[in-house]
Image: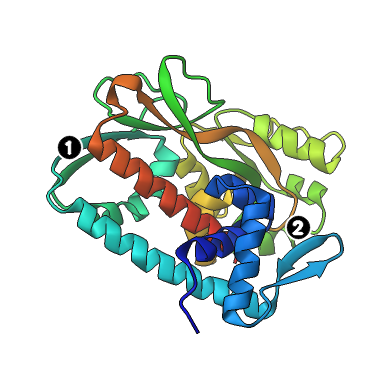
Amino acid sequence: MRIPSTQALRALDSFARHGSVWRAADELNLTRSAVSHQLRLLERDLGFDLLQRVGKGVTLTPRGRRYALDVRKALTVLGDAAEQQAGKGMGGSLSISCTPGFASLWLCTHIATFQSIYPDVALRILTPRRLDDVSNGEADVFIAFGLGNWPNHSVELLCDIEFTPLCSPTLLNRVGGLSRPVDVLRANLLHLGDHEDWSRWFAATGVENPDPERGIIFSDMNLVFSSAIAGQGIAMGDELTSRKALDEGRLVRPFEIAIKSPRSYFLVAEWTKTDHPIARAFAAWLKAQLAEAKGKAYA
């Protein structure tokens, strides 16, 4: 059997992560028909079916899913090898301003990978006072949480966020379980900055007279999660920053109901700093890491 083309493998990987041809086409800057053509060619080269029709849609076959996971691993190895070579000899410094929650709960648990690729780059992580603050003149790039409106800056969407209630297993047992949305009112509500997220979740679930302003307001997501893990109440969190705590069983997700946040994480920089080679390398690494994290979440 001849080795499949890299483009066909990337088409499969993107389809497996996104679950649709049109999203894969958007990510790869191809037409939908081009992605479909690549998948058909890959099936022909492999000699087995990758796709199956389910209703009006198309999904991967069980064998296709297993093959796609192997392809993801292979592409990651190839990408890491290229980045390792690209990083040789690149020096200098990079200051990253990042929201406290994202910095401690995600960036700080992944940043050593970037350092291993670019060992001669001196890194500095800063945290702003506000989640959408991009005013620090010492920072080269910003990971900001907001609506995406930063005039006179380069702005690139990193990821959208969905919020859902999260709590410790201890609290879940103490309140006798949470089978209905209204049951969260049996515990403290933990808020980040204001009551907006809980208000929107109550509206989405139809809880009557919920009093979303009850509970405790924190200024930092680390404090919200620390309180939730200690069983002090129920937090409104996202799976990106809480993934490690969920995987380790320190937090649980009692409901499937989630609300899309009006705010998202963005990579922001002054236009004069967008050609910074290290900043470009960091942006590429960050987007690849987030794409991999999203792929694992859907696997």
Residue 65, quarter of the rendered image: bottom right
| Residue 160: image location, x then y, percent | 58, 40
Residue 298 showing in the rendered view: no
Q: Quadrant of residue 167?
A: bottom right
Which quadrant of the figure has residue 190? top right
Give the mark toward the camera: 1 or 2. 1
Residue indicated by mark 2: 178
**Nearest to the observer: residue 266 or residue 218:** 266
Determine the CA span between mark 1 and mark 2: 48 Å
Element at label 1? strand
Answer with left or right where residue 125 lies relative to residue 151: left
Residue in view at x 52 percent, y 51 percent = 240
Q: Residues within 10 Å of mark 1 (few under 14, many from 20)?
A: some
Q: Secondary structure at mark 2?
A: loop
Please give the name of the residue rendered at 67% of the width and 50% of the height, measured from the top-left corner: 32
On the picture, is 149 further left or further right than 111? right
Question: Disc 1 designates what residue?
Answer: 93
x 68%, y 78%: residue: 49
Label 2: how many Cα within 10 Å (few below 14, some 14–19, many 20+): some
Please give the label number shown on residue 36: none
Q: How is the image coloured?
A: rainbow
Residue at the far top in the pictured view: 152
The amino acid type found where label 1 is placed reads: Ser
- Give the left or right position of residue 243, taking residue 269 as reference: right
Instruction: In this rendered view, identify the residue nearer to me: 157 or 21.
Output: 21
Q: Amino acid at mark 2?
A: Leu
